[in-house]
Amino acid sequence: MGNERVIALRSIDLTFYEGEICSIFGASGSGKSTLLNLLAGMEKPNRGQIVIDGTDITKLSEDEMAEFRQRNIGFVFQSYNLLPMLTAEENVAMPLMFLGMDRAKRLRAADVVLREVGLAERLRHYPSQMSGGQQQRTGIARAFVARPKIVFADEPTGNLDSKTTVEIMNMMVRFARQFGETLILVTHNPELVEFTDRIITLKDGEIIEDSYTNREEKHEALT
Ligand SMILES: Nc1ncnc2c1ncn2[C@@H]1O[C@H](COP(=O)(O)OP(=O)(O)OP(=O)(O)O)[C@@H](O)[C@H]1O
Ligand SMILES: [Mg+2]
């Protein structure tokens, strides 16, 4: 920034395992979003590798990265990021378009997931006609519909009340477990890390702690 050099992250060395439910935790400005955006291929690091399932994503061109993301990655945003001109089912069907599925089949698949997140009555509603919690359920349905390998979520409940937060957290964790997907959640809220199996704590761009909430159970699951 101008003459000032901002180091957002340094000496990050992390391995995530398939099916892990992790949180990246830390104060504002600690580098959580930067780390998540790097992992999801939305930003490029100055140095280092980011290998997902054998592919170093830092080596991909923008087009290759876009395709890789469509095939492997789901994202849940704090501000939902639904397309306002599309209904809930059209928003959720979107990621399936890139997989070459025809429209009728896409909408049917979207409906199934929307019913699972409790939105059977809202399939044809537009984002502006839904509450924040309903919009985020739609966001979760969209993130999981194409069964990506990894779902990233950056403060997904940051705009929601505490009751809705618990519903949304349980829903994401349930989906990730059901499909055996890796979930990586960014939060500054110590109550939310309790929903995850592994907590990675950042401070000033560095990892200061990386621990499993139930080590034995996790070890069994990995071996
Ligand atoms: N595009 C950028 N240019 C310069 N500095 C940046 C940029 N993005 C982030 N930073 C800096 O990098 C550091 C980490 O920012 P980051 O957004 O990753 O933090 P965060 O942990 O997600 O914070 P929050 O909880 O407030 O979202 C901060 O010091 C921030 O000011
Ligand atoms: Mg952030």
Image: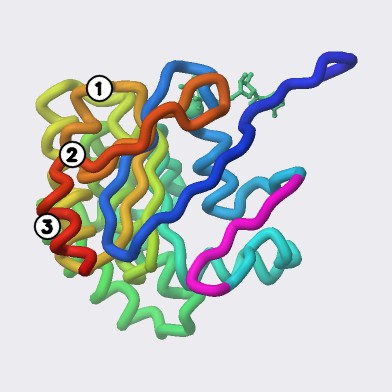
Give the residue pinned by disc 3.
120
In primary-sequence order, the first of circles 1 and 3 is 3
Is label 2 within 8 A of ligand 1 (CB to nearest ligand atom)?
Answer: no
Q: Residue at x 45, y 62 (%)?
A: 73
Amino acid type at circle 3 is Ala
In primary-sequence order, the first of circles 2 and 1 is 1
In primary-sequence order, the first of circles 3 and 2 is 3
- 144 and 203: which is toward the camera: 203
88 relative to 179 in the view: left or right: right
- 8 and 113: which is toward the camera: 8
Q: Residue at x 32, y 24 (%)?
A: 159
Q: Quick check: 34 above or below 158?
A: below
- Checking the image for residue 190, the label placed there is 1
Q: Residues within 10 Å of mark 3 (few under 14, many from 20)?
A: some
Q: Position of residue 130 (x, y in %)?
A: 25, 38
Amino acid type at circle 1 is Pro
Q: Quick check: 93 above or below 187?
A: below
Give the residue pinned by disc 2.
213
Q: Quadrant of ligand 1?
A: top right
